[in-house]
Each structure stands twice: as structure tokens, then as C-alpha cells.
Image: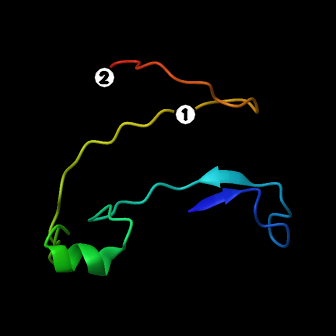
Amino acid sequence: MLEFQGLKDYPFYGRCYVMGVEPCSTFSEEGLLDSIEKGVAMRIEPAQSKCFSLKLTVFEGRRNNTGHRDCGD
């Protein structure tokens, strides 16, 4: 979910600047069906769990980001 002040009407009126991070089972630019056909999509069965690590960097302020440094684990 990306809402980088893109919704100019109700309910945010351009005042909302958020990003949501959602898990996925593939990262193909061609979409899920393409990944399934190529055999690279991860299959997750009903009620099955998968564990993973996720590392994010959050930048504050309105200036353009010119890079970041790794803060470690």
C-alpha cells in the first residue's frame, strides 16, 4: 500500500503520507501467474507458517534521501 499524498479526495485530501509493507510469495515483475508457471513462486498451504527476516530503513524529514548507512543488526 502506498499513499504518498496521492489521494486528493476523501478521506485524506492529500495529507496522508504512508507506506504499508506486505509479504508476498514471489517478486516477479510479470506477476504471480508468471512465477507459478516458471516454478519460482513459494506455495504456502492453508494454516501453514513461514518465518523470515525483514530489515527496513526509515528516513525522517522532507528532504530527498541521498543514501543510507547500515546500522547493523
Amino acid of disc 2? Asp
Quadrant in which residue 6 is drawn: bottom right
* Residue 30 shown left or right of residue 35 in the figure: right
Q: Nearer the viewer, residue 43 or 27?
A: 27
Residue 10 placement: quadrant: bottom right
* Mark 1, residue position: 58
Which quadrant, please, contains the N terminus? bottom right
Whether residue 41 is visible here, answered yes or no, is yes
**Relative height, residue 24 to residue 71 (above, below):** below
Residue type, mark 1 in image: Val
Q: Earlier in the sequence, mark 1 or mark 2?
A: 1
**Residue found at x 51% / y 23%:** 68
Find residue 14 and report its horizontal and vertical position in percent: 83, 59
Q: Look at mark 2 in the image and give the residue it sits on.
A: 73
The residue lying at 20 percent from left, 69 percent from top is: 41
Graded by Cα atoms within 10 Å as few (under 14), some (14 to 19) or many (20 or more), the crowding at tag 1 reads few
Q: Given contact means CB atoms under 8 Å apart, are the residues at marks 1 and 2 in contact?
A: no
Residue 8 position within the rendered picture, expressed as x and y whole percent measured from the top left: 84, 66
Front-most of residues 10 and 4: 4
Q: Residue at x 70, y 31 (%)?
A: 64
Taking the image as shown, residue 31 lies to the left or right of residue 11, namely: left
Badge 2 density bin: few <14, some 14–19, many ≥20, Cα 10 Å: few
Please name the residue shown 80% across and 64% down the image.
Answer: 12
What colour-coding does the image apply?
A: rainbow
